[in-house]
């Protein structure tokens, strides 16, 4: 299908998006690790100077990393789904299921964006801060939900476009398990028979 080449070019052009997300998640994880390490070392060397709010900051960083990496899971088809059932479907029905999945996910992500923004807005309105010595503005923490959901929404829109306009049954696989990657002795999906 000629349109598959156009999709490949568009996907390649968005490589920067993947790099930014992966780099940001790596940095958030690294900072969380360093803070945790400093907290543990500080607790044993000089307990009086231990960072009292380290656990709080680590939680904030990890939550942000999880919400950002959820977009990568959409791109890599890594969210929980019934792959065993999907492998039994022929490509044309699999395409319909994937389109339906994308539509439901788009509505769900849109709901999370709206709900998350309501929480952020309320937190800004009441000037909510954490109860620890850090007094961290909670709207920054809450912002992870609408931002991560927006990133997922964009990825699901891209998937929807791919399955509706650039679908190629020859390259359709569930869970990205290609024939050469399957363990020996396992039969291929029924759709390939």
Image (cartoon, rainbow, N blue to C red):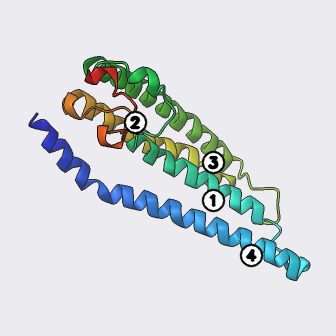
Which residue, given by chain and number where applicable, does mark 1 sit on? 61
Instruction: Measure the C-alpha gap from mark 4 to mark 1.
Output: 15 Å
Q: Which residue corresponds to the image point at 66% horizontal and 56% vertical from the top-left? A: 60
Helix, strand or loop at disc 2? loop
* Comparing labels 4 and 2, the label whose residue is closer to the camera: 2
Instruction: Measure the C-alpha gap from mark 4 to mark 2.
Output: 39 Å
* Comparing labels 4 and 1, the label whose residue is closer to the camera: 4
Sequence-first tag of 3 and 1: 1
Using residue 180 as the reference point, say whether residue 140 is left or right of it: right
Which residue, given by chain and number where applicable, does mark 2 sit on? 175
Helix, strand or loop at disc 4? helix
> Is the residue 136 above or below the residue 115 in the image?
below
> Is the residue 79 above or below the residue 42 in the image?
above
Residue 168 position within the rendered picture, expressed as x and y whole percent measured from the top left: 19, 31
Residue density around tag 3, few if under 14, some if 14–19, many if 20 or more, within 10 Å: many
Residue density around tag 1, few if under 14, some if 14–19, many if 20 or more, within 10 Å: many
């Amino acid at each position: 299908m000629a349109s598959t080449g156009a999709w490949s070019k568009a996907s390649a052009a968005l490589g920067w998006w993947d790099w930014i997300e992966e780099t940001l998640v790596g940095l958030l994880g690294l900072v969380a690790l360093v803070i945790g390490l400093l907290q543990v070392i500080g607790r044993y060397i000089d307990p009086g100077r231990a960072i009292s709010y380290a656990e709080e900051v680590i939680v904030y960083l990890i939550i942000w990393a999880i919400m950002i990496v959820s977009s990568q899971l959409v791109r890599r088809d890594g969210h929980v789904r019934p792959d065993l059932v999907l492998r039994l479907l022929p490509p044309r029905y699999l395409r319909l299921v994937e389109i339906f999945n994308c539509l439901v996910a788009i509505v769900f992500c849109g709901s999370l964006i709206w709900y998350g923004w309501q929480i952020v807005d309320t937190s800004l309105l009441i000037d909510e801060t954490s109860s620890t010595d850090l007094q961290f503005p909670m709207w920054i923490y809450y912002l992870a939900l609408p931002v991560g959901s927006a990133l997922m929404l964009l990825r699901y829109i891209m998937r929807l476009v791919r399955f509706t306009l650039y679908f190629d049954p020859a390259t359709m696989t569930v869970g990205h398990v290609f024939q050469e990657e399957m363990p020996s002795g396992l039969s291929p999906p029924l759709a390939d028979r």
